[in-house]
Image: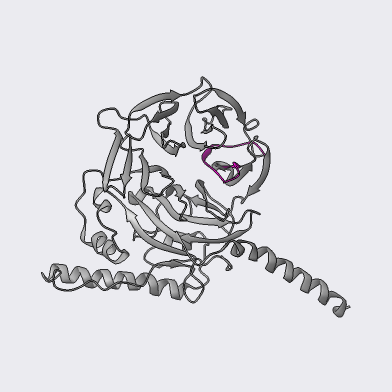
Amino acid sequence: MTTMPQFIESDSVTQALQSQSWRPQRPSGARRLVHALAAVAVAGLAAVLGGCASDAPIKEAPPLVWPAPPETARIKFLRTLVDDSDLNQDTTASRKVLNFLAGEMAAANRIVEPMGLAVSDDGHRVYVSDFAQGAVFVFDFEKKTSLKIGAPRDPLGGPMSVALDGDENIYVAEAAGKGVQVFDRTGKKLHFITDKSIERPIGVAVDKARGKLYVADTGRAESFEHTIKVFDLQGKLLSKIGKQIGDVEGSFLFPTWITLDAQGNLYVSDTLNSRIQKFDPDGKFLRVFGKRGNSPGQFDKPKGLGVDTFGNLYVVDAGWSNVQIFNARGEMLMFFAGRGALPGFLQNPTSLAIDKQNRIYVGDSLNHRVNVYQLINTTAEDSAIKAADDAKAAEAAKTAEPAKK
């Protein structure tokens, strides 16, 4: 992640970004990539309509990566997760484009409005909460099976974020239910965690090492419950994080999605303040990431969060339909995706999860799917290079100053 952000867009795919001043550094390369995908899709679709799809092999398009060539790629688009059929095939980007253009038959367990994401420690199972269906889908890629928890028999009350504990019990924030429903891996109800102060829970995160459950209570416009509530895993309220509603450090204005890093530090999407706040395991404020704006490192409506194995923070921005990446010091490294319907692009994304192999899952709500990406060509040192480069530039400027005099 040594490069600054590459703003990837296409005239046909991300016009919204153009109107919002997110300009590409290398637009021609990005357009060629998207046009190449479209060309492959159109050619394949023509073959299908001509009755010879079974005979003609599908030509693979170049991988969709960020930043665009000739820069070193850091993020690679892998696939989409839409329904049960994705358990039995690792569908390529080219095939997905064909299916997108030709129209797909809906499978039994099809994602409609993904709002929460979690991944098992071994990376085999992906948990997706679906707000529209009142359910949580469990896709098991090892066993090639799926499970639907909740609807239609016992629908959940506005399921939002999902988190897992050390036994892989499932914690689901129910916005309408005003609490957190807990299930075991088979979908059996274990218990319900709530408190009389909870108004609208959106985000959940489990600190496995410390046995804590964090719940982001988004509250309402007329309330003061814009806080993070901390419970033990049996449901006892331990403390609250957040001062009176507002924009000072440590206060929130509609906090939504949350995540934890390996050290137990808490990150909160302070959505209507257009920033991310970081707290230590004791709830002490540490730093702010970003602010409102339309430039690199700034946000419109930040939502889903995740931390990779190098300690970098990933932030979904529903307004810009992209994911921004920051190092631990709060310096922006790059971003990927952008507004569009083609596989790999996003429309009003919500949630995000990262597994231990640095696969990145993003809930793509208006495209009714989960996009899967992979962090590539990256080491721990890459996250520090921006600071080192800035220090070198400052030193060079300092050295040159006497010469000017």
The residue that appears at 39% across and 59% down in the rendered structure is 345
Q: Position of residue 59 (x, y in %)?
A: 26, 73
Question: How many numbered marks does the figure carry?
Answer: 0
Image side of residue 105 versus residue 376, left or right: left
Please determine whether, in this image, residue 188 is positioned above or below residue 102: above
Q: Position of residue 288 (x, y in %)?
A: 65, 47
Q: Position of residue 251 (x, y in %)?
A: 64, 36
The residue that appears at 45% across and 48% down in the rendered structure is 353
Quarter of the image holding residue 48? bottom left
Q: Which residues are magenta?
A: 250-267
Which image quadrant: the N terminus?
A: bottom right
Quarter of the image holding residue 395? bottom right
Image side of residue 224 versus residue 69, left or right: right
Q: Does the segment drawn in magenta span residue 214?
A: no
The residue that appears at 82% across and 75% down in the rendered structure is 399
The residue nearer to you, when weighing 404 against 2, is: 2
Which image quadrant: the C terminus?
A: bottom right
Q: Is residue 338 visible?
A: no
Q: Position of residue 388 (x, y in %)?
A: 69, 66
The residue nearer to you, when weighing 131 against 64, is: 64
Q: Does the segment drawn in magenta span residue 260?
A: yes
Q: Is residue 257 visible?
A: yes
Image side of residue 229 versus residue 389, left or right: left
The residue that appears at 49% across and 37% down in the rendered structure is 203
